[in-house]
Amino acid sequence: MTLLKIARMGHPVLWAEAEPLTFPLAGAVQRLIDDMIETMRDAPGVGLAAPQVYQSVRLIVVQPERGPDAPVHVLVNPVLEPLGAEQEFGIEGCLSMPDLQGLVPRYRRAAYRGFDRDGRPVSGEAMGFHARVLQHEVDHLDGILYPMRMLDPRDIAYTKETTHLIERMNRLAGEPSR
């Protein structure tokens, strides 16, 4: 497996809408999946979208649970649908924007569907952090970076300076759901 170079904010591949993949997936796409998993783990991250490694295709890998034995989910051509209107704020980072974090509203629950690497349909419901990771990675497939979802441009900070984000997130948690 190969560690891939991660595209940084400003590169055009991150602003483009990614193209759907067709099945069966070629050997090159299977290698891309393996390399994306290796790159995500090495970074370390909890998700990675193909555009982040300069491949404008609708493919994400996510590992919302930590630990060496935690499963990695591969979603090809993923589709997300919010389940309800309830949103919550959370602090997000991005491998394409190292050393920065932002306060981002996301749907608390989301249904997902797509295909695994073998072309088998997969679907389910995600809540909390898992739903946040899926929304973040699918946004990459649509050319959206998390600052575009932020409500206030002041809600971004370097990782070592996130105290005000935590305080603001706690204040917002006491407000009615948006």
Image (spheres, helix red, strand yellow):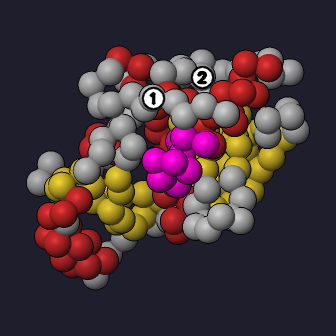
User: Residue 120, image x and y in percent?
Assistant: 88, 38
Q: Quick one: quadrant of the C terminus?
A: bottom left
Picture disc at residue 113: none
Q: Position of residue 119 (x, y in %)?
A: 85, 32
Give the residue at x 30% y 41%.
97
Instruction: Determine which quarter of the picture holds residue 12.
Output: top left
Residue 57's mark?
Answer: 2
Image position of 85 with respect to 24: above or below: below
**Type of amino acid under label 2:** Val
Q: Is residue 49 left or right of residue 174?
A: right
Q: Nearer the viewer, mark 2 or mark 1?
A: 1
Q: Identify residue type, mark 1.
A: Lys
**Label 1 environment density (alpha carbons within 10 Å; few <14, some 14–19, many ≥20):** few
For residue 153, say whether it is visible: yes
Indicate the secondary structure of the residue bearing disc 2. Answer: loop
Q: Is residue 160 above or below residue 122?
A: below
Tell me, yes or no, whether the highlighted magenta stretch contains residue 52. no
Q: Which residues are magenta?
A: 38-48
Residue 59 in the image: state x and y as whole percent. 63, 32
Q: CA distance from mark 2 to mark 1?
A: 16 Å
Report how many numbered discs are placed on residues in the image.
2
The tag earlier along the polypeptide, 2 or 1, is 1
* Residue shown at the point (23%, 59%) measured from the top left: 159
Give the residue pinned by disc 1.
5
Callout 2 crowding tier (Cα within 10 Å): few <14, some 14–19, many ≥20 = some
Residue sitting at x 26%, y 79%? 170
Residue 166 sits in quarter: bottom left
The vertical placement of 67 against 36, above or below, is below
Q: Which quadrant: the N terminus?
A: top right
Of residue 60 and residue 8, the one placed in the foreground of this image is: 8
